[in-house]
Amino acid sequence: MPRSARSETLRDSLGLGLAVGLYGAAFGAAAVAAGLSPWQASAMSLLMFTGASQFALIGVIGAGGSALAAIGSALLLGTRNTVYGVRLLPLLAPRGFRRFTTAHWVIDETTALAISAPDRVLARLAFLVGGGSIFLLWNVTTLVGAFGAAALGGAAKAALDAIVPAAFLALLWPRLRRPFPEAAVQRRVALGGAVVALVLTPFVPPGLQVIAAVVAVALAGPPRKAAAEEPA
Amino acid sequence: MSSGVLWTVVLVGSVGCYLLKLVGLSVPAAWVQQPWVMRIVDFVPAALLAALVVVQAVTSGHDLVLDGRLVALAVAAIALALRAPFIVVLLLAGATGALVHVVWG
């Protein structure tokens, strides 16, 4: 029983690592299309290593946005990982220097793997194997995508321009559907964010409309009270 | 944007994102798990990603531009609704964008 739970955890972690790692090629290609050098794209996958923030940064750069707007959008999307760290701390309990290396792999996928593992030992295994395989593949495929895109031209550029919005939609999509918590509210906020960005586009410096779209978070309303506090 | 500025953006953004991860592993949980903080963190990605979708799909600088990107986005949405894998969604969108480019120039 523990043996099969262990192999199941290993299989899930490696499988997710392979699947997610392949998206790196799309990132590498899109980064070069946005004007980064292949080495800058690779530095981002190596050092930033959080997909949504990486795509946001190059998205703003590609739209002609300022340096501050690009960094700001990456950081705003990176706040998720702070919350993930809080959830992972009791499971992984990294001590001393391990805290600094563990932090680098705190992303959507490793958090999901660790939290869904049946116990703490397997949670650590899932985090290590998932994090390791995603990190390795994400970086290799970023290089392939970046240097591949740099060698292309013409219709390939049009293909890349079309891939970037589709990539953002694919990142957004799971949040808008059940079983994601409060999917209907997420849809309202997403629609609000899209409208704010579109309306501001003619008037603000490019990229700033993306940052300004966070005001749509207000559409989510106040925090829900714990059910125990208010018996119906 | 010059190469030097781009490198600065890449490195500052990376350090910032790393520190956001490290903070979660380093501060008391109660500091982060405030109801309002959690509310905002839960919904920021939806607002920002949706904004990035429309900015990337239908704008160019200050202008609204309708071209193959929007057609590709529609194809991507259909593929996602049919639960296609991420990589298939991107390939379909890319092929659509290239096709529209070739057909309409």
Image: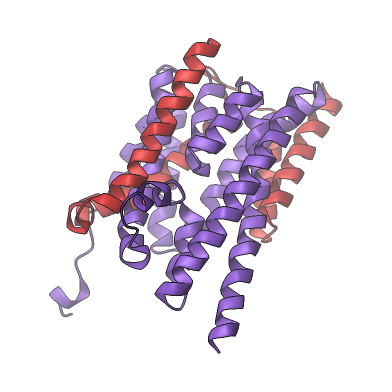
Chain colours: A purple, B red
Does residue A155 lie above or below B23 as drawn? Answer: above
Q: How many labels were placed on the picture?
A: 0
Q: In the rendered view, does A168 fall on the left or right side of A163?
A: left
Q: In the rendered view, does B7 fall on the left or right side of B23?
A: right
Does residue B81 lie above or below A22 as drawn? Answer: below
Q: Quadrant of the N terminus of chain A?
A: bottom right
Q: Quadrant of residue A43?
A: top right
Q: In the rendered view, does B18 fall on the left or right side of A144?
A: left
Identified at 63% across, 21% down, the residue is A37
Q: Nearer the viewer, residue A99 or A200?
A: A99
Does residue B66 lie above or below B48 as drawn? Answer: above
Q: Position of residue B54 (x, y in %)?
A: 53, 35
Q: Nearer the viewer, residue B66 or A157?
A: A157
Residue located farthest toward the bottom when viewing the structure as drawn: A1
Identified at 54% across, 37% down, the residue is A46
Q: Nearer the viewer, residue A124 or A149?
A: A124
Q: Nearer the viewer, residue A202 or B96?
A: B96
Identified at 58% across, 84% down, the residue is A3
Q: Quadrant of the C terminus of chain A?
A: bottom left
